[in-house]
Amino acid sequence: MNRLDTETQRIDWRRTTWLPVLLALLMVAVAGIFIDRQSQSIAEQRMRSEVLGQLSIIRAKLEGNISSDIQLVRGLVSTISIQPTMSPAYFQDLAARLFEEDSQLRSISVAPDLVIAMTYPAENSRNIGFDYRTNPVQWNAVKEVVDTGRLVLAGPVDLVQGGTGFVARFPVYVGEGADRRFWGIVAAVIDIDRLYRDSGLYDPDLPIEVAIAGLDGKGHNGALFYGRDLDAEEPVEAYVALPTGSWKLTAIPRQGWAQDSFNAWLLRGLIVLAGGLVILPIFTTHRMVELRHRHIAQLRTRERELAALTDRLDLALQTSQVGIWDLDLESGAEYWDARTNELYGLPRDAAPRTYEQWKSIVHPDDIERSEVEFKSMIATGRYEAVYRIRLEDGTVRHVRSMAMLNKVPGEPDRVLGVNWDITRDVALNEDLRRAEQMTAARNAELEAAKIRIEHNALHDSLTGLPNRRYLDEKLQEQARHGYHGSGGIALLHIDLDRFKQINDTLGHAAGDAMLIHASRVLRENCRPTDFVARIGGDEFVLVSEAGEEDSCLAPLAESIVQAMRKPAHHEGHECRIGVSVGLATARGTDIDVKQLLINADIALYRAKARGRNRYEFFSAALQAEVIGTKRRADEILKGLDTNAFIAHYQPQFDARTHDVVGVEALARWNHPTQGLKTPDSFMSIAEELSVVSSIDRIVLEQALRDLERWQAMGLVVPRASVNVSQRRLHDEDLVQSLRELHIEPGRIAFELVESIYLDESDGIVGWNIDRIKELGIDIEIDDFGTGYASIVSLQKLHPRRLKIDRQLVDPILTEPAQRRLLASIVDIGKSMDIEIVAEGVETMEHAAILRDLGCDILQGYAFARPMDRYALEDFLRRESWRKAS
């Protein structure tokens, strides 16, 4: 029974002793996994930071190169707007100067009225005469320039002259004030390969792989046009800001995100080794304890020997791979086991050893300390020390020694000790210390790089001033907290005057010098608490405290204007620039910084309009003007939804019989508060809103309904003439929408002005006009004689009717020359079998002369004014015009 209990206890003890081994193994595994994950995370963060730094350099080069190319062409556009009739030779000279600059420009084309008339270089001369409206591929971008009046950067696109490139198209306007009109466009082709090369994308040593998306400047919504799709590979991202839109850049390392496999596996090997050094002693201790208990069970009768063995085994439980030594304090005799002899470089035998032998092996620098430690510590019954030993071959080892004093009654005192080699541990600790130092140094480098990147991202590289991004962040912060606690923000939008002239005459180096000079002047004239930023080109923004009154900002604005008037010198040239300043303020705690920027911009334009080199405050009058335009636009859109646009009709009469031969349908706006509005009060805003086509469609559909109504009432109205806008003639779905209306042939005529058809007889417009004729809809030319008509274009179009403008009709009573001119127009029309309609017939004397000159149809106040359908019905029933005639 006792034997059974002993065996059960032994089994339970074995189960218990395995638990520390398993727990230690688990802890070592968890620690190793954690260290490995941390190493991978640090390596990945470092790689992403390096890739972002490389990508930021490419983004900055792309933005700078594109901006530089566009600024070059803007100067040419300004020159053309001033001299629209420049000769080709003069143009070639100007363009050649542009190409002397370091740019990526490939070619420049000038297209007055959207037809290329001049190109540079000369090998592109085959493009002269090319009409953009005939090329559906390029027309959408050109049409956007025409509609918006802004620069459009498209690409990459296929070029007419071959190859691909980015195309920047600039609108050109000539004239001033009310005479300002659209003249044409200037198209500049940016060489795609040169742009990529100058921006660093073709660098063979580039350590990253880059992809660019955002075709036609559509940012992350645009298609990929450079590189392969990297979105699935967790790339870093950056955006290139374009004049119209942006590009999305993504990048990854060329070798991928995987870190150095050799270093990773080396670290894992060290972790496994360290874990082994922890687990192996525990496992060995477990085995030795088990062996000890087995010996106790077998050697109970050998008590004296068992006591000494137990002391040695107890000490061995704390060690692994150890050497055991035994010292007799009375005789000085020592015993070293084989492991200790091997550790000290001696033969693995049981020969007696002495203290002098130990002393001869210990490193000379550690002997004195080791002796003192032994004497001071062994008296306490326990000794532990670390020292170095030097072998005969010069090898140095680090040894840890532990011992305890063993006293047995009746015998001399003895010291039982163990030694083990910790050289690898010391080396490993040293390696870890160096690795920590290297990691700290690399982290410091990454932090410094991060600071540099953040500074570059928020500052202008030329002037050192904050950029637009920094300005936006600053304004948001000040809108939340107020300007230094005042609660009010003032914005000064500053634009340099005559800057383009300096750029064009002295070059971009002089322009850069003027920008640096301007930034220095702004810093010198603003207060220490003010914030100055360059937001692009020659534009700056100064953020200051609003103060209690706007007038307190006038001295600041005046000092800036006066300081900028002073000449600056660059390479022996005296350069004079000026500034126009727009000021806007906002006070309170809830400030809309976006609106504040808009207000300052509006004030800046007012300052430029009033002569430049001055400052203007944003005022209630300016705001009312902007709000009024916005309100009128909203009312027009609402009017389209509420059917507020209606048709009025002006009858047309046979010149000889005075019978009604048709009506002209005119658009009217039934304003809810201001009554009936004629097109001159809303058509310009409708053009900006691109809703003229909708108004034309409404008038056409109402005219068709009224023609059916009058026919059912027995009133004779043979046809209705309806205006059609240029935008609607460019609609590819126009013909299909007309087919759906089932228009009876001859009942509807479309009136076209000369500016629509004469230079657009090809392409979509020409195709639509031909299909319209096939549907039985007549084509009439409105306002003939006021534009730039050509007989050839008139022959190509071959309209059914030609309407002579009232400006030609009115003087025929008193000017014989004007009457002869009218007779010539009538003869031209008759020779082409075209009916002649004269509008603006104010008196019956006009009617008689026009009849005698051969006009077929008359229209004007002498017979009837425009009226709504009900008034027209009454007019037709009473035949009021016959009394007048």
Image (cartoon, helix red, strand yellow):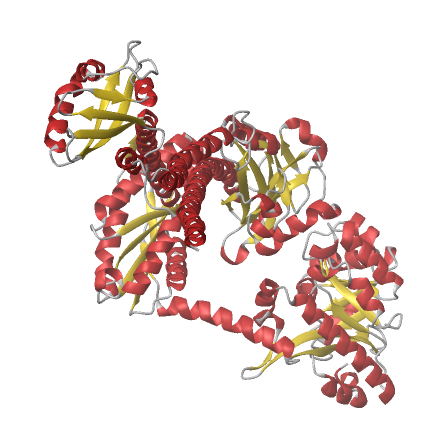
User: Residue 807 at what x, y percent from top left?
Assistant: 66, 63
User: Residue 818 at what x, y percent from top left?
Assistant: 70, 59
Asked whether 637 or 131 is in front, the reply is 637
The image quarter in which residue 508 lies: top left
The image quarter in which residue 376 lies: top left
Query: Which image quarter is the N terminus in?
Result: bottom left
Asked whether 585 or 804 is in front, the reply is 585
The answer to whether residue 318 of the structure is visible from this angle is: yes
Which residue does the image show at 80% across and 48% down from the upper left? 792
Which residue does the image show at 48% across and 32% down from the upper left? 265
286 displayed left or right of 857: left
Which residue does the image show at 62% across and 53% down from the upper left? 144
Depicted 70 relative to depicted 766: above or below: above
The answer to whether residue 854 of the structure is visible from this angle is: no
625 displayed left or right of 215: left
Depicted 446 relative to depicted 626: above or below: above
Q: How many marks?
A: 0
Asked whether 544 or 687 is in front, the reply is 544
User: Residue 720 at what x, y percent from top left?
Assistant: 80, 74
385 displayed left or right of 476: left
User: Residue 854 at what x, y percent from top left?
Assistant: 83, 64
Asked whether 440 or 401 is in front, the reply is 401
The image quarter in which residue 705 lies: bottom right
Depicted 412 relative to depicted 849: above or below: above
Query: Which image quarter is the C terminus in?
Result: bottom right
280 displayed left or right of 646: left
